[in-house]
Each structure stands twice: as C-alpha cells, then as structure tokens.
Image (cartoon, helix red, strand yellow):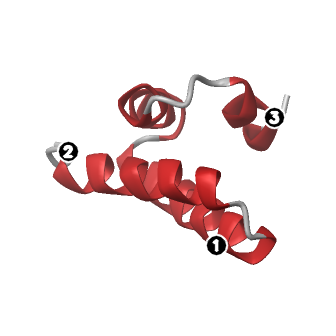
Amino acid sequence: MSTKSQLSEAQDNPHDIAAWLIKEHGLMAAQRVVLDEVLAAQERGDFYRLSVFREVRRVLAQHPDEG
C-alpha cells in the first residue's frame, strides 16, 4: 500500500498523523512527506487537507530530534 493511500486512511488528527509518519519513515522523511502533502493540497485547492498537513508540519517541527 502506498504512503498516500495510507495517509488518506489515517485519522485527520495532526498528532496521530505525525506519530504514524515518524513511526513509518523517521522524523526527517516524515517532514519531507508532509511538505509534499502540503504542496499537493495547495495545488489541488484542497484547503481542508492543506490545514491538516500544515498542522502536522507544526507538530513535527516541535518533535525532538532523533538521536
């Protein structure tokens, strides 16, 4: 299953999405996935998904660095 389809099945809770992305990809790759999702939502004009992934980006930015 692709990341995009797994993301679309996830809850729309930014904290849950962030935790899942970190678990699946690690912090750095999770940040790249979220950036891609923000840009895609912006391109599509999907303002709801854009707001969700902007919040996920904020949650990831506050996450302690991987050691």
Specify whether 63 is left or right of 23. left
Q: Which mark is residue 5?
A: 3
For label 3, the SS is helix
Amino acid type, callout 2: His
Foreground residue among 32 and 46 = 46
**Amino acid type shown at disc 1:** Leu
Mark 1 Cα shell of 10 Å, populated few (<14), some (14-19), many (≥20): some
Residue 8: x and y in percent read: 73, 34
Residue 32 x, y percent position in the rendering: 52, 62
Mark 3 to mark 2 CA distance (whole Å): 24 Å
Q: Are marks 1 and 2 in contact (CB under 8 Å)?
A: no
Query: Looking at the image, is 53 positioned above or below residue 4?
Result: below
Where residue 57 sits in the image (x, y, percent)?
38, 56
SS for tag 2? loop
Asked if 43 appears above or below 62 in the picture, the reply is below
- In primary-sequence order, the first of circles 1 and 2 is 1
Residue 28, can we see it?
Answer: no
Rendering coords of residue 9 (x, y %): 73, 24
Q: Nearer the viewer, residue 42 or 4?
A: 42
